[in-house]
Image (cartoon, rainbow, N blue to C red):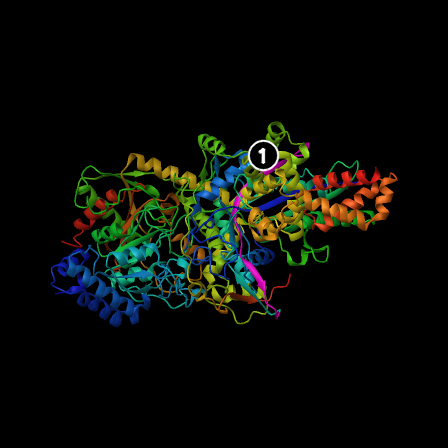
Amino acid sequence: MKVTTETVDYVAALARLSFHGDEKEKMAAQLQGILSYMEKLDALDTEAVKPLEHLENAVNVFREDEVRDSFPREEILRNAPRRDTRAFKVPGIME
Amino acid sequence: MNYRTVIGLEIHVELATATKMFCSCTTLFGGEVNTHCCPVCTGMPGTLPVINRKAVELAVRTGLALNCQISSFSKMDRKNYFYPDLPKAYQISQYDLPLCRDGYVEVGERKIGIERIHMEEDAGKLIHDGDGKSSSIDYNRCGIPLIEIVSRPDMSNAEEARDFVEKVRTILQFIGASDCRMQEGSLRVDVNLSVRPVGQESLGIRTEMKNLNSFRAIVRAIESEEKRQIELLESGGVVIQETRRWDDDRGMSFSMRSKEEAHDYRYFPEPDLLPVVIAQEEVLRIKDTLPELPQQRKARYMEQLGLPEYDAGLLTADLGISDWFELVTGLGADPKTVSNWIMGDLMRIQNEKNTNDNPVRPEDFARLLALVGEGVLSQNMARKVLGVMFETGRDPDGIVEAEGLRVVRDDQLLEDLADKVLRENPGPVKDYLAGTEKAFGFLMGQMMRKTGGKADPGMAACILRKKLGDRGN
Amino acid sequence: MDIAGMDMTTAGSLLRDRKISVSELAGEYIKNIREKDPSIGAYLHVCESKTREDIQKAQDMIDRGEASPLAGIPYALKDNICTRGIETTCASRILKGFLPPYNATVADRLDAAGGVLLGKLNMDEFAMGGSTENSAFGITRNPHDKSRVPGGSSGGSAAAVAASMALFTLGSDTGGSIRQPASFCGVTGLKPTYGRVSRYGLVAFASSLDQIGPLGKTVRDCALVMEAIAGHDPMDSTSAAGKDACFTGELEQGIKGMRIAVPREYLAEGISPGVREKVLEGLDMLASMGAVWEEVELKLHDAAISAYYIISSAEASSNLARYDGIKYGFRSDNARDLAELYSKTRNEGFGEEVKRRIMLGTYVLSSGYYDAYYIKALKIRSLIKEEFDTVLGKYDLIAGPTTPTTAFGIGEKTGNPLEMYLGDVYTVSVNIAGLPAVSLPCGTDTSGLPVGFQLIGRAFDEKTLLRCARALEKAREVLP
């Protein structure tokens, strides 16, 4: 698998990151190095193996539908870099 | 050229739980901005989701009511995308192992297939500030439990689609899975639509219109998109696979392609939640708790109450109406009479007031019908009283008393009035005596007018004819 | 009296016997922080007013005679564990200034036990790294040799214990992040079974691998901390219910007849001679106490690193997507619209290693690569777990080194991410299989740097694991 700068652009866009100039080349090379190392895995036959999605055997871990107090609004908003007294703020979004 | 339209729907329905899907915040509608929030539903670092048992149960009920297979093993997945209304930047949903699959809904003579039903969480709400420079985010709705019902592409026109949504909505209300208040956004529909020339085997390219939240919008959006696609093909163009935004005010849709990016949601199993396993016995237990469904209730109304199919269908299209009907008839009122009143006057009043609510107490309504039966109120007077009952919530006896709406059945009074009417209208009297029956109606009208509509029509007519007979002799 | 040299049991009984006060004990540690930390850099923040409150509360508990073994014990937390009203940054610029409105479950439990919180500890940003050089707020130095790294990602947690700047600390271990720094700093670190300790309030790196655990001076100290923090939490669906929660009960019962597996691969290529020698010495000690050790084969040893980096990066790419400058932490001032708000905030807020992992994780989950990388890794995870289960079906424990080398020099590996990743070779498979493991000091190499000895146990059988670790500790006469 060849990691090109186009690959870096595509993946970075999905991850909301961006790389420019040398950074992009460097990222491509590093990803390439890591992914090449990972190609070792291809040697293992896993055709009949079930992917392990959860370590534990427990299932149906549920909560009862009982209302608890929400947090005071100020606690919810207090860490927001841009806000007013009621809400989080983002740059205008026009649909 | 003739075209066939193929429509598939995705219906997002808010489940009737008290708390959110993954935290204990309330699901109440209409709270002050950002007051139904906690660290979990606002995606703060380190917080973890825990599944609401009731949400799973309601989703299973829905699956059973829509004739689905309930998966013995299902799991939650993350759907990753960035948008300010989604605080974790992923939505917890179900991807390859949904809770329910392969169901159907009977709509008239047809079965519309249901591909799958899965559980997920709602996003927050963006409020566009007046200045256009900034937007506010309200996370109250964030994390509210939803199910997404995905139909098969089994519909071919707007009416079918509307009927399907109506049917699903009624069933969900009957089983208590959702209140389906469209005006509050608790039922939203995405429409997938394509057209193809008659005779063409393969499906055309489809577009998707998201978040339609009224029956009117569904119908208009489908008709408009059908027309747009056909005109495009007719003029030699091609349909582009895209998401379009329906603008209900302007009655047209707009491409959202410029806003979109590659749909690469990078679904993967949610590591913070364990699988949902539902044993067959549990499915049977839940099935046992399902109430009578609309279809069954309709059949019962026809068989046991002798209602015509039309009446039975209309009454069972809305859980509130149907339950109300049962309460009134349970008090001894005649089913067909009640049905006529509901379909006639009650629904007219609701339409006029543009509401689905019905504040009239069943016992009050039964009393109203009894007053008509006893001859205390005429049909017309009862209509007026119902209007007041609907408006004020007062009981019929009180209204009759207060408004002096009692039928006039006093012989002497009616005889005196009849004499007066005949004296004042010599022309019509002459016409009547000459054989013009129409003139009798006019004279009756005068009688009613003089009593403010309160004369007992039977008695009044009887007395009037007697007096006219006397004159003729 | 060398107050700061005592272990928890000794300090605890002096507190309960009123030989020393809570404030005296905490004072020793605070003094150590003031004197030593400027040249070590273990702490990101100290929390003076919280410390004062905790001292008062603990002293009251002791005075009322309600004291648990942790009452009055000064401790500190890795900075990825949320503390109400106390800055929690994960050593990342993107969380600078974040004041959680809630406590992690472990923080609540230590509060309830009467622990005295001193502050929050440095780490690799978002726990990604093995040297604590990836902190956005400066490096931490190894107290044994200040030109060397303390290991990571819980480097601050290990260094603080090693330099007596906390009696115990909590760290988190996703692929070795407790054990490797414990090994580098010559302290004891326990990575509990996945599901043992609630993850609620632990800022997620890789949710299916992360686990909080203690670092302490002794095996018993770690066991005592476990008794306070372990157990089911309704806020964490993956926390196990109904498991035995006694960790100290069998510590002194010895290891006669215990069967220990030593994977051949753990002592083969890549291991430094100094580490190998000390590990073999440790194994001999275990044998002399009546345990039997045999070499076994772990065929999937080589695959573990790849599977680990695929799974952990995939989960991290999703877990770290929420840092967008809207709800908390850093927000770029240079953004003109929403798209720029995201990309500039994330570009300016995350460090290089974090971005690399997000890129890797996004890549392996993206359309077209999901099956080849992510699903493949989950399948290998299945096989690795099976392999461990098989070995642990025949043996009570698995033993070996914690790391291939002792602490390396600052800056030595920063240029080569893959080489850094390979340092996790003995630790990651434990997280993949969800097993408990402990690293404890096992002498020093020729440069005088601590060597770590790793023991791996069966799921939820920390008891056996700690019993063996205690036996080795005793044999090494780290303590009387």
Give coordinates of residue B397: x percent, y percent: 56, 47
Tell me the quarter of the picture where residue B429 sits: top right
Q: Is residue C313 above or below residue C50?
A: above
Query: In the visual, does A94 lie left or right of B84?
Result: right
Judging depth in this view, the residue of B33 and B50 nearest the camera is: B33
Give coordinates of residue C420: x percent, y percent: 41, 56
Secondary structure beneath label 1: strand
Crowdedness of circle 1 by 10 Å Cα count: few (<14), some, many (20+)? Answer: some
Residue at which label 1 appears: B102
Q: Is residue C144 above or below residue C441?
A: below
Query: In the visual, does C14 lie left or right of A54?
Result: left
Which residue range is magenta in the image? B104-131
Given the image, on which type of amino acid does mark 1 rest? Asp
Q: Is residue B206 above or below residue A79?
A: above
Identity of the residue drawn at 68% across and 37% down:
B154
Query: In the visual, does C166 lie left or right of C79?
Result: left
Q: Main secondary structure of the magenta part?
A: strand
Judging depth in this view, the residue of C284 and C174 nearest the camera is: C174
